Amino acid sequence: MITVQEAEKLILDSIGSIETEEIALEKALGRCLRESVLADRSLPPFDRATMDGIAINSSSYNTGLRKFKICGTAAAGSPQEALSDLKSAMEIMTGAALPLHADCVVKIEDVEIKGGKALLPDGLKLDFHTAVHSQASDCKTGDELLSPNVKISAKEIAIAASVGKSKLLVSKTPKITIVSTGDELVSIDQIPESHQIRRSNDATLGAALESAGFQEVNLVHIPDDPEQIETELRQILSSCDALILAGGVSKGKFDYVPEILAKLGVSIRFQWVSQRPGKPMWYGQFSRDGSRLPVFALPGNPVSCFTCLRRYVVPALEKWLQMPASKPVYAKISHDMSFKQELTLFVPAMIESRPSGELWAKPLLFNTSGDFISVAKTDGFLELPRGRKVFPEGEAFVFYPWPR
Amino acid sequence: MITVQEAEKLILDSIGSIETEEIALEKALGRCLRESVLADRSLPPFDRATMDGIAINSSSYNTGLRKFKICGTAAAGSPQEALSDLKSAMEIMTGAALPLHADCVVKIEDVEIKGGKALLPDGLKLDFHTAVHSQASDCKTGDELLSPNVKISAKEIAIAASVGKSKLLVSKTPKITIVSTGDELVSIDQIPESHQIRRSNDATLGAALESAGFQEVNLVHIPDDPEQIETELRQILSSCDALILAGGVSKGKFDYVPEILAKLGVSIRFQWVSQRPGKPMWYGQFSRDGSRLPVFALPGNPVSCFTCLRRYVVPALEKWLQMPASKPVYAKISHDMSFKQELTLFVPAMIESRPSGELWAKPLLFNTSGDFISVAKTDGFLELPRGRKVFPEGEAFVFYPWPR
């Protein structure tokens, strides 16, 4: 049995880097960028008005001129205009290029326009580039605006669009297969017999992966029959990019899965982790065409399964895609807790951001069942480290939000 | 000009509730649940083994019996078995129904099996329902397991699946149209002239809405021509469920949008908000077929536009869908800041969860440009309230994460 930290390290160290593909910008949301995005020109490309008003030369105002002849209009999207002389002004719109000979913009609220003249009051503070966004002040041609290995959100779309990247190099989307086993499980739309329960692990894991950004997930259920499990897993391993099994990995008489995986050539990295829930968790790798596919076998208990997915599988798949590792979130525990076993304890908890700026986590006590009913009210889980017995109110521990 | 709080209240108070539709469970991720989900039977439906091992009657062990005859195997998914007598044991798998006459499970690690007998050591703590998840301990038939008006995540999928809800009643997905205006804007794949810039607002807003869970977003660009704007907006208002305009709402000569919206019958709720960025922000409603569609006109500056979308539009659309309001997040500001104007200040900031359990926000200073280049490195923005001039290091303010 290995520790949570050892299991995490074994998994992450074994994970390589998935291949890349080029996709259209409008499909790139949520994907992992795998190239640098450079400025194709300076930004802003010209001295740009940041307000609606009039463009003038500030030295004329600062040497006493208050009445400027209006010589035209500079609209956003039109080529650069020019003042006819230093005593003239030009109406200008936000986003327009500052006219030649002008060096600042006076906002419309400060201007009175009358008979083709702009009248300015005393006391305005006008200097070089007042209300002007100077050319090249944001970036110069060739500057790296986005680095590789970021998750593409709306902000990254904004930058890519502004420099004309209508296609982006991103990580491929892995084809993930989730396999559930267990003869006690019937499908969602069946009425179970009293000794049966409905199959929910596969749909839950699929939804969790989808909300973590993995869209290509395939769900398969196999009865507890060793031959059938072997046949179907062989087939799946020949085509998927990652395999996640739910159930069948404990010490029960019908827990054939580890043996069959070994027989199919999946090399085991570990089987038992000193954690609750989720002790019987199996991780291995399968070599195919020069790459190593991750194979996770998670305990069948729904909460164990979900916790292990969040704690190990999602970070591993994100690393495979070259996503940056999520920064840890720390939350103070809102109740004294004690736990005497030599296991890392994952406690589902409700999170609360307090007006003080502190994050507090209220642990779900007395949850021993493994069912989702009370866990559904929580926001994630606290990780209470192994080797301690007491976790006093107010001490902060790492908190893992559920996929949402 | 109204305050941020007044604008927020005017918007939220005016928003109704969108219609519902029934969809398949596997399509329900991210949607807003609009019905109660009830337990269709008690859970667990039977006394359920939580470990692999043997099922016995604890009183036999506690009165001295250490050697139990094995009378069979209880597998998960099989109908309930029965011990042949109180001195017998049955091998049992996690998830199986506890056999009749048995009242606890001894985990496999504590059992030695030899010649058809299970040998138990002294000193085990065995009681009624040790390692058994008692029938109906999670819920009883008819209990409400999920309430209406929650966002459906993997956890809610788990519960719906477990009670056999293969279809769910959810909020309809609104058809949102984003209209950008501005003649200075060219499409992403064009090489702009020096006075032009590429159009990025529409793609950015679309991506932000998509990551906030709004999938049906349509992007339209209209040149700065009043007649064309009027014609196209009339058409759009006759078919979309919500309209968001980017640009054309300031005080510039070519900012026709508010006038045209009024002419088309959109009733204005407000136009100016005492905030930076985003002062020229327009909100109104359009009545069609007995419902009132929200119409937002956001400033054209990319960062203003994005900030207003996050601060006002996303919460309004979420309320329309009957999503629960997001709980506020508070973060301590990591630098002294001062701001003298009578405006609420939205400051883009990087967020850091410290091991103490405190959340800190590092504001992006000197960002006056409205461009995304430095904003892309931030995680959201702090809202620094109007009416104060000094915001000292360590004081907590509300933080709005960017859509991601």
Image (cartoon, coloured by chain):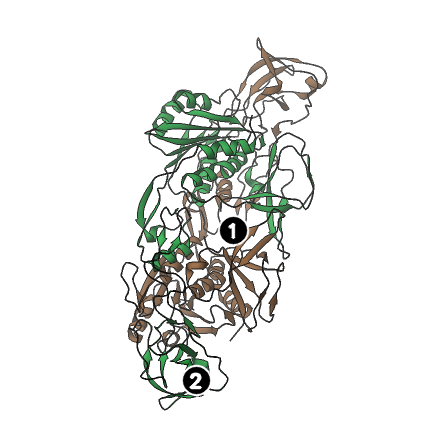
Chain colours: A brown, B green
> Circle 1 marks a residue in which chain?
A
Q: Position of residue B309 (x, y in %)?
A: 49, 37
Q: Position of residue B211 (x, y in %)?
A: 45, 45
- Residue drawn at x 49%, y 79% is B125
Q: Position of residue B109 (x, y in %)?
A: 45, 81
Q: Nearer the viewer, residue B168 or A138?
A: B168
> Circle 2 marks a residue in which chain?
B
Q: Which mark is residue B84?
A: none
The mark lying in front, picked from 2 and 1, is: 2
Mark 2: which amino acid?
Tyr
- Is the residue A98 above or below the residue A257 in the image? above
Q: Which mark is residue B61?
A: 2
Q: Are the residues tagged 2 and 1 within 8 Å (C-beta)? A: no
Quarter of the view holding residue A395: bottom right
Looking at the rendered structure, the secondary structure element under dot 2 is: helix
Q: Position of residue B228 (x, y in %)?
A: 38, 23
Q: Nearer the viewer, residue A143 or B34?
A: B34
Q: Neighbour class for label 1 at 10 Å: few (<14), some, many (≥20)?
A: many
Q: Is residue A232 visible?
A: yes
**Disc 2 from disc 1: Cα separation:** 59 Å
Q: Neighbour class for label 2 at 10 Å: few (<14), some, many (≥20)?
A: many
Quarter of the view holding residue B20: top left
Q: Which residue is mark 1?
A: A150
Q: Nearer the viewer, residue A336 or A241?
A: A336
Mark 1: which amino acid?
Val
Looking at the rendered structure, the secondary structure element under dot 1 is: loop
- Is the residue A86 above or below the residue A192 in the image? above
Number of numbered discs overlaid on the protein picture? 2
- Residue drawn at x 61%, y 67% is A390
